[in-house]
């Protein structure tokens, strides 16, 4: 029941900060939508980040999680907030391997067999989250759970399930409408 109350508070914060806007919008894909999720507003707001971290940390409390991972750029503040709240170290997953220095795709200490949660800001199809999950798996990590602040409910949960990944949205767009 505590989680439901915390999620309701998160929904209020998202609404109050106009993170989810209704109207006519053209998305980055070029598609038209009757709502827009401005996650940059959410991931730069300390109150929202704190609430997200509180919820995720509570959900994973009894799990044996070694690391919290977030793909760049949007999920890095989320992973940071969860790491600070839970005391679990974090990983940053780059969009692409850098061609200089250590040429790492993942920044942080990922060891073979580490149990990892992957966090994301918003999902539509789930492709970027899946890419992050595969990066962790390809580098020896075991992805235990994946979380997203807002699921646009446009196929991400189903797509990821087909790939063997269970997505746990904190908020689905239908919760806000």
Image (cartoon, rainbow, N blue to C red):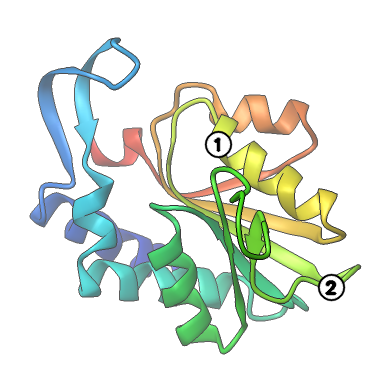
Farthest residue, direction bottom: 87
Name the one closer to the observer, 93 or 119: 93
Q: Position of residue 150 (x, y in %)?
A: 38, 44
Q: Residues within 10 Å of mark 2 (few under 14, many from 20)?
A: some
Residue 111: mark: 2
Kindly identify which residue carries mark 1.
Answer: 128
Q: Secondary structure at mark 2?
A: loop
Q: Secondary structure at mark 1?
A: helix
Residue at 84% across, 73% down: 111
Q: Say if 155 sits above or below 169 in the image.
A: above
Q: Tell me the quadrant of the picture where the C terminus can be found.
A: top left
Q: Is residue 140 left or right of residue 146?
A: right
Q: Position of residue 133 (x, y in %)?
A: 70, 47
Query: Quadrant of residue 76 in the image?
Result: bottom left
Name the one closer to the observer, 70 or 122: 70
The reply to whether residue 100 is visible in this rendering is yes
Residue at 11% across, 47% down: 18
Q: Say if 114 sits above or below 40 in the image.
A: below
The reply to whether residue 1 is visible in this rendering is no
Q: Say if 99 sits above or below 28 in the image.
A: below
Query: Quadrant of residue 13 in the image?
Result: bottom left
Q: Position of residue 107 (x, y in %)?
A: 62, 67
Q: In whole angstroms, how far apart are the C-alphas of marks 2 and 1?
A: 22 Å
Q: Say if 66 sits above or below 156 in the image.
A: below
């Amino acid at each position: 029941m505590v989680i439901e109350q915390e999620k309701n508070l998160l929904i209020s914060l998202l609404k109050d900060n106009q993170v989810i806007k209704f109207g006519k919008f053209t998305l980055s894909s070029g598609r038209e939508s009757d709502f827009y999720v401005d996650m940059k507003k959410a991931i730069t707001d300390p109150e929202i980040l704190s609430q997200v971290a509180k919820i995720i940390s509570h959900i994973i409390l009894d799990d044996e999680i070694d690391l919290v991972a977030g793909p760049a750029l949007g999920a890095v503040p989320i992973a940071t907030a969860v790491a600070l709240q839970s005391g679990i170290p974090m990983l940053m997953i780059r969009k692409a391997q850098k061609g200089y220095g250590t040429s790492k795709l993942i920044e942080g200490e990922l060891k073979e067999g580490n149990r990892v949660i992957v966090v994301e800001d918003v999902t539509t199809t789930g492709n970027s989250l899946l890419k992050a999950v595969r990066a962790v798996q390809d580098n020896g990590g075991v992805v235990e759970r994946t979380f997203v602040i807002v699921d646009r409910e446009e196929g991400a949960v189903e797509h990821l399930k087909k790939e063997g990944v269970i997505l746990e949205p904190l908020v689905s767009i239908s919760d806000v409408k």
